[in-house]
Image (cartoon, rainbow, N blue to C red):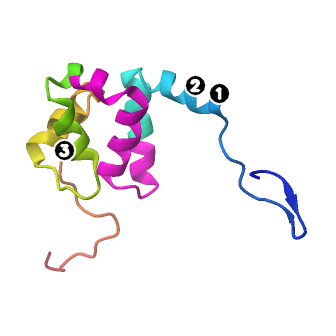
């Protein structure tokens, strides 16, 4: 059982409660909060597809489809790790959060090195 003691001692990871997940889903309906959440996930080395999947699933795929004008089946496919969404689809999924795709130099890249 999550969070209970074992012979080796208490578990180090507590599982989020249902209330926590419901609160997060509510918070993710705010585009500014969702944008920051996506950015934090990317900083934590989640893929863009994983980050969008977490936020969109919490929001509700069908409801999110109304914001993007994309069919919910396209959104489900785009956030499925077995599929590779196009740049156009990713742009459409990012737009409600005020985000867009871009290219930036890697931090710590040495001068004089070819890409």
Using residue 64 as the reference point, say whether residue 86 is left or right of it.
Answer: left
Please name the residue that numbered disc 1 is placed on. Answer: 19
Tell me, yes or no, whether the two marked residues, 3 and 1, touch with CB atoms within 8 Å. no
Say which of 19 and 86 sits in front: 19
In the image, residue 9 above or below residue 75: below
In the rendering, which numbered label is found on residue 109? Answer: none
* The one of 20 and 92 positioned closer to us in this rendering: 20
Q: Earlier in the sequence, mark 3 or mark 1?
A: 1
| Alpha carbon separation for disc pair 3 and 1 | 33 Å
The local crowd at label 2, few if under 14, some if 14 to 19, many if 20 or more residues have their Cα within 10 Å, is few
Read off the residue under disc 3: 101
Which residue is pictured at 25% across the width and 40% down the height? 76
Question: Residue 3: horizontal and vertical position, in percent?
Answer: 79, 51
Horizontal and vertical percent position of residue 25: 49, 27
Secondary structure under tag 2 reads: helix
**SS of the residue under disc 1:** helix
Q: Which residue is mark 2?
A: 23
């Amino acid at each position: 059982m999550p969070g209970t003691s074992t012979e080796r001692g208490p578990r180090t990871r507590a599982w989020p409660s249902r209330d926590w997940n419901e609160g997060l889903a509510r918070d993710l309906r705010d585009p500014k909060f969702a944008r920051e959440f996506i950015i934090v996930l990317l900083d934590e080395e989640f893929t863009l597809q994983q980050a969008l999947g977490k936020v969109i699933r919490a929001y509700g795929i069908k409801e999110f489809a109304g914001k993007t004008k994309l069919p919910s089946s396209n959104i489900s496919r785009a956030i499925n790790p077995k599929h590779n969404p196009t740049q156009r689809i990713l742009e459409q999924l990012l737009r409600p959060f005020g985000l867009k795709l871009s290219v930036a130099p890697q931090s710590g890249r040495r001068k004089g090195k070819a890409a």
